[in-house]
Each structure stands twice: as structure tokens, then as C-alpha cells.
Amino acid sequence: MSPTTSLSILRMAVPGPLRRIFDYLPPAGCDLSRLQPGMRLRVPFANRQVVGVLLALADSSDIAPSKLRRAQALLDSQPILPAEMLNLMRWASRYYQHAIGEVILGSLPTLLRQGQAARPTSEACWRLSPAGRDVDRDSLQRAPKQAALLHILKAHNEGLTAEMLNQQLTNWRPAMSRLQEKGWVDMREQPVGPEAPNPDREPETPALNPDQQRAVETLNASLNRYQCFLLDGVTGSGKTEVYLQVIQKVLAAGQQALVLAPEIGLTPQLIQRFRARLPGRMALLHSGLSDRQRLNNWLACANGEADILIGTRSALFTPLPGLGLIILDEEHDLSFKQQDSFRYNARDLAIVRAQKSDIPILLGSATPSLESLHNVSRQRSQQLSLPERAGDARQPDLRLLDVRHQKLEQGLSAQLLNSVQQHLDARGQVLLFLNRRGFAPVLMCHDCGWHARCLRCDAHLTVHHGQQQLRCHHCGSQRRIDRRCPDCHSENLNFIGAGTERVEEVLTTRFPDVRVLRIDRDSTRRKGSLDAMLTEIQRGEPVILIGTQMLAKGHHFPNVTLVGMLDADYGLFSSDFRASERMGQLLLQVAGRAGRAERPGEVLIQTHQPDNPLLQYLLRHDYEGFSQALLKERADAELPPYSHLALLRAESPEAAAAMQFLQEAKQQAAIIHSQLLAFGPLPAPMERRAGRFRAQLLFQHHQRGELQHWLARLMPELETMKSARKVRWSIDVDPMEMY
């Protein structure tokens, strides 16, 4: 069919899994001169209407005019995405082999994806009136909901929004109306957006040690051109102070700064430090914000009204017209890699954005990833080292506790418990690390050996004793704890192993006069619960912290003098080639919470492998030796960063369907590129998850460009295969987890 000519065609990115751009006719009566790339339009797609983003205007289409559908409405008067962001997203779509529509629309705030206007909005906020503060809660015994609202509002002088109230009470609006009628509560609309500069910020800049000073001077000299820097500083070496002083220079030049943190749990302390020191307006973007807050902060950044943006990985896609610097804190962290849908690595894409914007990027970590260290050796990055802790703080003493042949009390050795008591007696705080939440990982029948398994996954159900539930940590299914064995009807059921909940119970019994705080995903579900516990820790009173890796990253606990790692062996024998790297990073990150102020710190690591050479490197704080040993292993095995991988995953209700699709994909790959290495297909390490069977096919090539060229040819072929219709499949370029 001959192409259409002399016709204005809208080339649109539309949300959906199809890896293509869609052509539309302009909206009826639309002034074509108003149309610019980066604008949103409402368009028909299949049997519904969706919001798409205009990528380009064309004079022709491969689709006949009679088959082209007309866009319904233009939603913006100005582009919401500038050309530089569209270019970055196009690059990401090509590199990660993902649908351009999902890349672009997925980067927008939810309200913009829904078609709402791209302008700031306000939200209702309720707070107690002066009369309401004098009301006695006991006078509302016949109105418990009103009494509960008064109690909550008295604890929040700044007021509460609807979203905050929804998290604490259900069906609260009728009671709130009664309180307003009585004059005890006032409601007002308040703007939602970036925070104004703190008028009480610290005026003085702390003195830097020589290593910090060299790092700041090197970074300041490179502020107007692209350069990738790796700030390799031991825990407590003052990396954040380097960030602050370089950002001050960027703000003084009238530019914006983007700071990415791996998880929302790390942002409160960063925000507190930045608010206390920096003069600019600060915007936040993370999953803890309401849709309205995200929209307003996103717009403030895009309009140049926010000077500093702090966010998690998705904040990378926020337009910043005056961007002068990108910082990634804890650059090694796995959280920078999106593990589903659009599987991008925010660290790698941030480097691409800095390169395209011709600005510097700073990657900070006490335990840099092997990829970043390899880039330093290839002179793609410049390493800046902070080998000593800032101020008077010293590196903690690390010791291995050989727990072979020892009796353990729910994973706690007698040596570790004695040390806990000694540090508490000295008015120190104790942090115990166990990367296993719940009460026990297995419920087992002592008489017949039955154990509780998930009906939808190849996994045990974890015991959560407080809620009297068995939960699957993979698919989220849950049920009550069995009272009898379903096989032999015995009541002799045992909890096998220990999680953070069980260790908390032991510690509470063993140290009844000391506050025990458990910090994991279960104990911090309620909004503000983590902040409340961190505030309690900062008071400095003796306390025992027990938690998962949430405790390991970036937190500053100046009064923690003892860190205990309950199990250091989990990463030594994993089938994942990255497990040893992650084990070492996590161990040193956890150890780095000890002795960060004047008081010396001690770290005790329980292990059944005290002679393991990798642990010996870490015992000497020799992360360089540890990483070089792992890099040699990777080079010998021709694994990343010395080669490049892509993982083709498939899942289906039937195991045979997933394997058949991957087998045909392997055959098609061999036709396109006979030199490509393909491993599999094989069942995933956890073959069945959420009721679906999973399999995978691994591709490997020594040249990144060759792998990309081949993937670009393979993907269209996979989309047309009949076997692809029976499975859900995805491609993961540069996979970080091999499951």
C-alpha cells in the first residue's frame, strides 16, 4: 500500500507493551502550529481512550488515511517533556529493549498519566483551632471517632491532610464535620510543593580534612563539563559533606542539583542534613508522597522553581532545565535497578543523562560496585578516595565469632549476648543484623516431617507469630498458622529457624530493662513509624536494634558501639555470581554503623566459615583487596563486567509453554547471530511463583554493542512467534539478579 502523503501525522508514544510508535491524525479543529513534541494528547487506543505523548510530526504514514484514527484532544499548551528528556527516554527504550510508550508514560506523575492539567494544585489540611486544643478527650466518650481525631490532631500541630488521616482512621469524614461544626477544627487549602529554604540553616561550613578538600576542589573544577566521579569513602568518612559543599557551588551558579538515594528509608536523614545547610528550595520525589505532592514537586522541578531534587530511582526522569550536577548516594545498591516492567538501572542511566547534558555525575559509596571499579580501571571514571573517618571517629574493630559446635539461642551465641550486655552497661547502643524478617522461616511437623509451603510458589511459608499468620514473602499469600499437621494430624508443630521477630522476643526476655526496636518491612508499614524509631534512637539512650538491611544503609547512629551480624555465611555459597559481592558490601555497610562518633565501635560477625579468604579481607577493612579478588574471579569466568548479559524470561501457568517459547527463541537467536552464547533454557531457581511456572534463557557477549545490535533484531521476531502468545515474557538487559 502506498504511503499517505501531504498530511500532518502525529507520531505518538502510547502506554502499552507493543514496541512501536503509533500514528494519529490531529484533533478536529486543532491549530497545527500549536503542536510540539513533548505534549500530551488524549487518543483512542483499541476500545478505550488513553493519554499519549507526541514524539514528532510527520508528513506521511505507512498506514492508509482511512485507517488512521484521530486524536481526541490536546491536553497541554506547552510541552511537559523537553527534547533532552525525550531523547534520554528514546535511548533507554532502545537500550533496554522496552516499549517506548511505557518508558515515557511510566516516567510521568500519575495525575499527568490520567490526563489532569499540568498545573500545581492545593489540598485540604485539618488542624485544631484554639478552642479545640482546650477540649478534654474524655468529654467525648460517646463519640469515640471524634475523640480519636482530636487525639491525632493534637499530636500534629502542622495539621493533617486527607491522605495522612486515611492511614490512621477509616470513615473519619463524618466525625471531622462534627468537629468543624463545633468550631474545634479548622480546614484550609494549602499549597503542595517544594519546601522553601530553611531560614534557620547552619551558616558555617564545617572544616574539611585533606581528602575531603581534594575531592571538593576536583569536583568544583569540573562543574561545567561531563565527567564521572566515584567517591570511594569508608563509612563515616564524610561523603555527605562533600555532596553538600559541591551542591552549594552548583546553586551559587544558578543551577539545579539532582540527588538520588536508593530507598525512601534513606531520604529522611539526607533531607534533614540538606535542609539544615543548603539555601535552595528542595523538592522530593519518592513513593511515600501523595499523587498531588508528586505532581506539584515534579512541576516545580520542570519549571525551574526547585533548586534541589532528592528522590529514588524514578526521579531520574524528572525534567530539570538548569541541571548542573547529579549525585547517586550508595551507588552500589541493588534498589537502583528496576526489577519488573521497564527493567532499567538508574545508576547507568544517570551516567547517560549526565553525558548527554555535559555535566558531572558523582557516584558515592563505601563499597563501590565492581562495575564502577572496573570503569575506574578503564579510565571511564575518576576515583576520589576518603580512606579515613571524619573527625575523631575511628574504624570499628571487626572480629569473627566461630559458632561451630556452639549452642545458639535463636541464632545468638553466648559470646555475642555477653558483648551486648557489656555495651549496654557502658550506656552504648547495640545493633543486631539479620536479613530474615518474620518469626521463623519454616513451620514443620516433628512427627512426620511435613512443612508449610506456599500453594502458589516453590517456597516455604514464613511464620509471623504476632499476627498468627503464615505468609509467603514471594507472592504475598497468607493464612492462619496450622494447629495440627494436615498430613498426620499431630499437634507437635515446631518453628524452625529464627527471623527478626523471634530474635526480638529473645532479646526482650533476656534484657527486660532495655528498649528493643525491630526495624524491618513489617514493623515500619505505618507511615511515620520508621521516623519515630529513628528519632528514639537519636536520643542516645541504651537500646537494642534488631533489623534487616533497612538498618544497613546510610543511617547515622552516633551512639551505636556494638554491631552484631548473626549470619555472615548466606552469600558465600549462592548460585548467583553476584552474591559474594553483595555479602561483602552488606557486611561492611552494617559494620559501618558502629563507632561513628567519639566512642569506639566493635563489630562481631558470627560465621561457620571463619577461614574463608573473602571474610579475611573484610576483617581487615580491605574492600579493595576483596573487590580485586572478585574481579579476578569474574575475569577468569568471563562474567560481568568483562562480558555483557541479557536474560530472557518467560512464565506461564504450564511449565512446558515457557520452555517451548524459550527453546524457539534460542533457535531464532542462532539464526540471527551464530557467535552469541546462549545458556538454557532452564527453569528459574524458584520455578513456580504466584501460580506460574518460570524459565529463563541467558545470552552473553563480550561486546555490548554487538549484543545490543543482536537484541534489536531478535525482539521483533519474538513478538511474532506463536508460542509467545501462550506466555508472559520479558527481556532484562544487564540483569542484576539471576532468578
Image (spheres, rainbow, N blue to C red):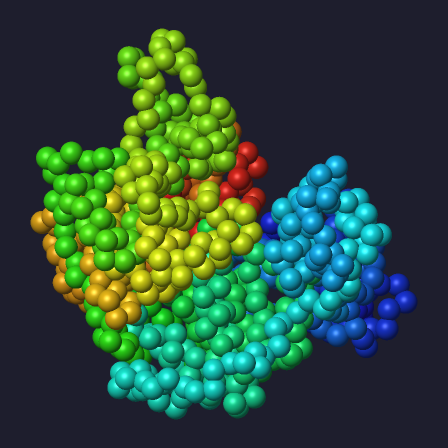
Is residue 233 depicted above or below 524 in this figure?
below
**Is 626 on the left or on the right of 688, as rendered?**
left
Any part of residue 551 in sight = yes
Quadrant, the N terminus: bottom right
Q: Residue placed at 21% from the left, 70% from the top?
A: 394
Counting from the top left corner in percent of width and height, residue 333 is at 38, 59
Counting from the top left corner in percent of width and height, residue 391 is at 27, 78
Task: Return the residue nearer the eye: 720 or 35.
Answer: 35
Any part of residue 256 in sight = no
Q: Residue placed at 83% from the left, 52% from the top?
A: 182
Counting from the top left corner in percent of width and height, residue 552 is at 34, 56
**Is 725 on the left or on the right of 202, as rendered?**
right
**Is 43 on the left or on the right of 472, as rendered?**
right
Is residue 590 depicted above or below 505 in this figure?
below
- Residue, far right: 29
Counting from the top left corner in percent of width and height, residue 517 is at 39, 48
Task: Return the residue nearer the eye: 603 or 242.
Answer: 603
User: Which quadrant of the figure has residue 12?
Assistant: bottom right
Q: Residue placed at 34% from the left, 18% from the top?
A: 493
Is residue 383 depicted above or below 625 in this figure?
below
Quadrant, the C terminus: top left
Q: Residue placed at 35% from the left, 32% from the top?
A: 440
Task: Return the residue nearer the eye: 498 or 94.
Answer: 498
Task: Return the residue nearer the eye: 728 or 124.
Answer: 124
- Residue, far top: 488
